[in-house]
Image (spheres, helix red, strand yellow):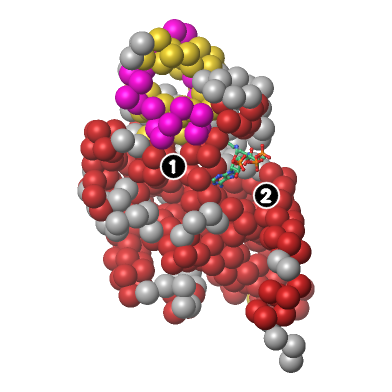
Amino acid sequence: MPDKSFLAWPFFDETHRRLKARLDPWVAAEIASREHDEQDVDALCRDFVRQLGAGGWLRYAVPASHGGMSPTLDVRSLCLLRETLAYRTGLADFAFAMEGLGSASITLFGSEALKARYLPRVAAGKQIAAFALSEPEGGSDVASLQCAARREGDHYVIDGRKTWISNGGIADHYVVFVRTGEAPGAKGLSALVVDADNPGLRIAERIRVIAPHPLATLSFEGCRVPATHLLGKAGEGFKIAMATLDIFRATVGAAALGFARRALDEALAYAAHRSAFGKPIAEHQLIQAKLADMALKIDAAALLVYRAAWTKDALGGRVSRESSMAKLYATESAQEVIDEAVQIFGGIGVLSGAVVERLYREIRALRIYEGTSEIQRLVIAAQTRAAADAEREVPPLAREEREPAA
Ligand code: COS
């Protein structure tokens, strides 16, 4: 059983503890039986979205004004959901996460008409959502993206390609980031909601990866989208993408945490009964050292993930630093925890179909998507330097008044 002692931390209130108490038995009853099913990922994802909608869990992905649970997205709830689903199966977590990521830009920046059209359907599990940012020429350097949209009367006309698009091929709508050219670089991007059946949008290629999930390259050729489908204002696309990722990067850390907790639990159970040199391997100090480091990394990751989530929920504003730290540490340390679990299992750990073998494949992409570990370091460095620069600019007198000498 995964450790639940963290629920007593001050980051949480009663609503979160109640959510977790309702969620655990639901996941055990509805999701656990499909945990080893990796054959038809499209059908499985559609099922998970429908189940999550019917269970009421997708209400956490949209605001209360449009069928959701709380006035704004509650990041601690999103993290608890992702952690719990990921503990059981990466694909169920993926299905939940994409409903959130593919609708959050609408929640944060959409017109009332767009919110009314898309969000209640997302909450009910009737609308599969996707977020289309990366391109064949790059995913990290968002300011240089090339997929273009030109204004023609009441429409935008999109031409170009997007790739690595999760839910590509099964989504009902895509939030697409395009170059509209108001200014060079980051200030010339916009975000449009494009329905999957919009003429001019085509699935160019399906992509298979080591932990399979629906993934595709999209092609836009003269794709005419009503101008009313613009999120925010023209030219605000970069900020819309970053503000959305600020929320979801912490939740990627939560998914990694779910994988890591599962790996530790599997390793603890195995080490308790597997014998070597006349005693269970858990009695050997080298194994104990591994278990200790795994538990330590999990707690440190949990502290960073729920610190980021609490900061967004309680203080609001930009949480780039907290969110990037959470994603970076939780995903990197989960990879290490899972690798140690495989090591404890020995040969059995690399058998196809073993839980730790699956986790080993599932964790890898989390260090890449929604900003690589290298990008998270850039964000953390930029935020840390900006804070130091701001501190230096405080006049010495004001600083003394604020921090009287001891
Ligand atoms: N919220 C709101 N505004 C933000 C923001 C955020 N989280 N992050 C940046 N901005 C704003 C900045 O304030 C700046 O605005 P001003 O010019 O008005 O001051 C503008 O956006 C540009 O910011 P910055 O100069 O920091 O951007 P960079 O071009 O240096 O790029 C990185 C920043 C590299 C961090 C960004 O491109 C990034 O996160 N890349 C990874 C993208 C990604 O996750 N790709 C994976 C695809 S999604 S699966």
For this view, does 23 lie left or right of residue 322? left
Which sits in the foreground, 14 or 290?
A: 14
Q: Which residues are magenta?
A: 213-237
- Give the farthest residue toward the top: 222
Please identify the quadrant where the C terminus is shown.
bottom right
For this view, does 405 lie left or right of residue 133? right
- Count of all numbered marks drawn on residues in the image: 2
Q: Is mark 2 within 8 Å of ligand 1?
A: yes
Q: Amino acid at mark 1?
A: Leu
* Location of residue 168 in the rendering, given as x and y in whole percent from the top left corner: 45, 27
Label 1 or label 2, whichever lies nearer to me, is 2
Q: Which residue is mark 1?
A: 101
How crowded is the residue under tag 1: few (<14 C-alpha within 10 Å), some, or many (20+)? many
Residue lying at 44% horizontally and 55% vertically, measured from the top left = 82
Which sits in the foreground, 363 or 308?
A: 308
For this view, does 212 lie left or right of residue 328? left
Which sits in the foreground, 302 or 103?
A: 103
Q: Amino acid at mark 2?
A: Val
Say if 276 sits above or below 378 in the image. Answer: below
How crowded is the residue under tag 2: few (<14 C-alpha within 10 Å), some, or many (20+)? some
Residue lying at 48% horizontally and 44% vertically, measured from the top left = 244
Q: Is mark 1 within 8 Å of ligand 1?
A: yes
**Circle 2 sits in a helix, a strand or a loop, which is it?**
helix
Asked if residue 372 shows in the view, the reply is yes
**Circle 1 sits in a helix, a strand or a loop, which is it?**
helix
Say if 73 sits above or below 308 in the image. Answer: above
Residue lying at 46% horizontally and 33% vertically, measured from the top left = 131
Say if 240 sits above or below 266 in the image. Answer: above
